[in-house]
Amino acid sequence: MSEFKIKTINTFFKRAVSVLERLDALLPQALQEPNWAAVAFRWEKVGQQGILQVLPTPHTFPLSRLAAVDGQMQKLVRNTEQFLAGRPANNVLLSGARGTGKSSLVKALLHEYAEQGLRLIEVDKEDLSSLPSLLNLLVGRPEKFIVFCDDLSFEQGDHGYKALKTALDGGLSQRADNVLVYATSNRRHLLPEYFSENTGHTGIGGEVHPQEAIEEKVSLSDRFGLWLSFYPFDQVAYLQAVENWLHAYDVAYDDVARQAALNWSLSRGGRSGRVAWQFVCDWVGRVPENRILD
């Protein structure tokens, strides 16, 4: 064989290997059986399927640390306990003011009910299209799974919500008895709505049947059987949240801490559970400057 042919063959094989390496990076990895002993997971889309990754140290805490959400907590706990008992329960949409404990309330459920078989699976909006694969994976398992979609909303032209609609209540297959969806959002209807959609006409190039467009947008939130609304904190609720978190760190809540918390909220231009948590992170970080409870 001539030297020219050998070089040509070697060049061909090098290019073929390069192409195969690129294809291998695009193809989904072989799916592995999840570690079902874990209590928290994250679902990530891979191709048309996905991987259930274990979260070894989930962010969770007792429900008693949360302030100003007693009514919402009572309804969510009741629904979750129905679910764990094998009785009918609803998918839940927690919506309202930012930083008021929507996500924290769901995360705290894991602390309270993991020993009773509750499992939490976090799913980002970008991975919702692979929800059918996740549901197929969970059907028949003895555990009870909450699929947690945090800070959920969709923009105009974003069609990811259709997979969620089907997973909630709109598919031909029966809903899995061991899976519920809990979602948080600042929008109750999850999709943007426009003033023009409420007018009697749509103008040139507008929607021919505007009411149908509105129904399409509202239909997603309607598939959540339980709506929980959250409202901005007043000063009393904010200070209660500060006190709860300081006690969790065994740090004294006294007049000095109270005034510092109020000054912190003024610097942030608002009061919420999130602002309270951020203050506590700063305040506790100064220990032993601040007094520790005996």
Image (spheres, rainbow, N blue to C red):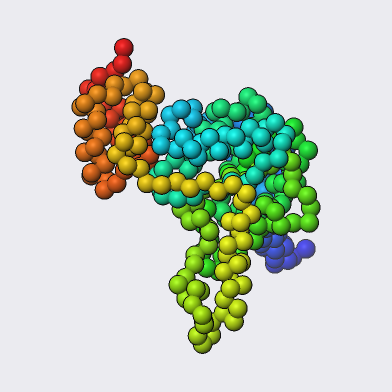
In the rendered image, which quarter is residue 255 located in? top left
Can residue 160 be seen here?
no
Q: Answer left or right for 185 relative to 221.
A: left
Can residue 239 be seen here?
yes
* Rendered position, 96 above or below 283: below
Q: Which quarter of the figure is the C terminus placed in?
A: top left
Identify which residue, 22 or 41, lies in the foreground.
41
Identify which residue, 28 or 113, lies in the foreground.
113
For the point 73% across and 66% down, the residue is 5
Residue 19 locus on image (x, y percent) = 67, 60
Q: Which quarter of the figure is the N terminus placed in?
A: bottom right
Residue 242 locus on image (x, y percent) = 33, 32
For the point 48% across and 47% down, the residue is 229
Q: Count how many numbered circles sit on residues in the image.
A: 0
For the point 67% across and 52% down, the residue is 168
Identify which residue, 28 or 75, lies in the foreground.
75
In the rendered image, which quarter is residue 286 located in? top left
Residue 209 locus on image (x, y percent) = 60, 78
* Rendered position, 216 above or below 135: below
For the point 53% across and 85% down, the residue is 205
Q: Answer left or right for 34 relative to 253.
A: right
Q: Answer left or right for 25 relative to 293.
A: right
